[in-house]
Image: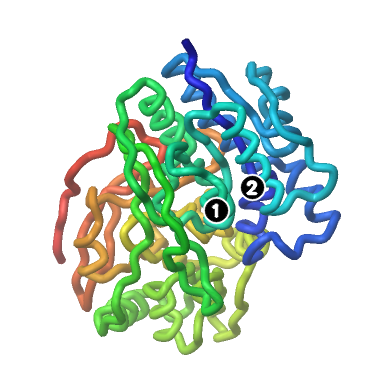
Amino acid sequence: MSVPVGVLVNPIAGFGGPRGLHGTDGLTDEQYAVAVSEGRSTERLLRAVRHLRAATDVELIAAAGVLGSDALTRADIPHRTVGAEPARRTTGVDSIAAVQSLQRAGARAVLFAGGDGTALDLASALGPEVPMIGVPAGVKMHSEAFARSPEGAGRLAAQYVSGNATLVWAEVLDVDDEGVSRPMAVVRVPRGGEPLQRAKSMTPASAGRAAVAQDVVDGADPGSTWIIGPGTGAGAVAEALGFTATLRGVDLRHASGEVELDVDESRLLHVARTVPGTRIVLGVVGGQGFLLGRGNQQLSRAVVDAVGAEHVDIVATTEKVGALLPPVLYVDDDGAGGTHPLLGYRRVRVGRRESTVMRVLDAAAETLPTTSIPARR
């Protein structure tokens, strides 16, 4: 007998990433329509569902309309629809009502696509007997409820349905009033052969960041144009260049010294393609190891391609690198086929005149190494 699994999507999740928006609560009606039409989150949900169905026999129960059933219908994926179709722009209230409908319909687990905000909404309604499996489709995804990729979410859901996973408690993080990601709730999630990502961890302030930053700046052409990614590690490079980064956004520092804050993907791509000597600085998400795909979707594959992998500086402290398990870095990429330019072994700056080499993997990879190859210089 097929095991019933609930399916739910936040249809506008992730829309703000490439555009440099910090959340989608303030979207205009036109922006909301574009977000639903683009379907970034629904496409990532479908990637997960296809992997789930390929691995095991399952009955899909979908939330009505744009919250799930529309996407499955367009993809010709059999399912049962429950709940009321939203009659207006969806909010967290609709997500909560939808997941309650999935529980009443007998869902044994809920596969959802969204970000930390969606996870927090569902956590307020899901009972402890119904685990959630997050398909990363928002901007941040700092919570433990998410798999590393849509494919990984589908594989983990299949393991749970097949009886090859146990249930554990996991933290749901979201940004507080001070802009810091903190635990807001706990939920039940499956633990199996396919790992969920770890929660983002905060690295204590360290003099090592300034040393790494100065090393990066000193080793670059003084005429470089800099694209500074989010986070404290990349932000230290901004300080070394003489300005204060936005930390949650992507900033530009031109060779002239002019600074543009919180820049979107289209502007970054224009600069990367037209300004020789452009560099990118990427930090590492603490506890998770992500370089791209968590809070920096402005830095698309097209932007990295235009700059060139050889002009990307990866910065971290030895403490942050040493806490990663497994000790590898990840890219969660929406690129259309091919290989991301950062995959492979990359130099990571960890101190003044000190670096290590770490492997960068596609987050959707089915097999992950347990070790990397360290090297010092």
Q: Is residue 300 visible?
A: no
Q: Which mark is residue 178?
A: none
Q: Which quadrant of the view contains residue 191?
A: top left
Task: Name the amino acid, label 2.
Answer: Ile
Residue name at image x 19 percent, y 71 percent? 354
Q: Is residue 259 left or right of residue 172?
A: right
- Dot 2: few (<14), some (14–19), or many (≥20) neighbours within 10 Å? some
In space, the residues marked 2 and 1 are separated at their CA atoms by: 8 Å
Residue name at image x 40 percent, y 29 percent? 155
Depth order, front residue of 168/142: 168
Q: Is residue 267 positioned above or below 86 on the image?
A: below
Horizontal and vertical percent for residue 241? 44, 84
Residue name at image x 77 percent, y 35 percent? 84
Mark closer to the chain start, 2 or 1: 2
Depth order, front residue of 30/345: 30
Q: Which residue is mark 2?
A: 96
Q: Secondary structure at mark 1?
A: loop
Residue name at image x 60 percent, y 59 percent? 273
The outermost residue toward the top is 1
- Give the number of marks: 2
Q: Which residue is mark 1?
A: 124
Q: Is residue 103 left or right of residue 82?
A: left
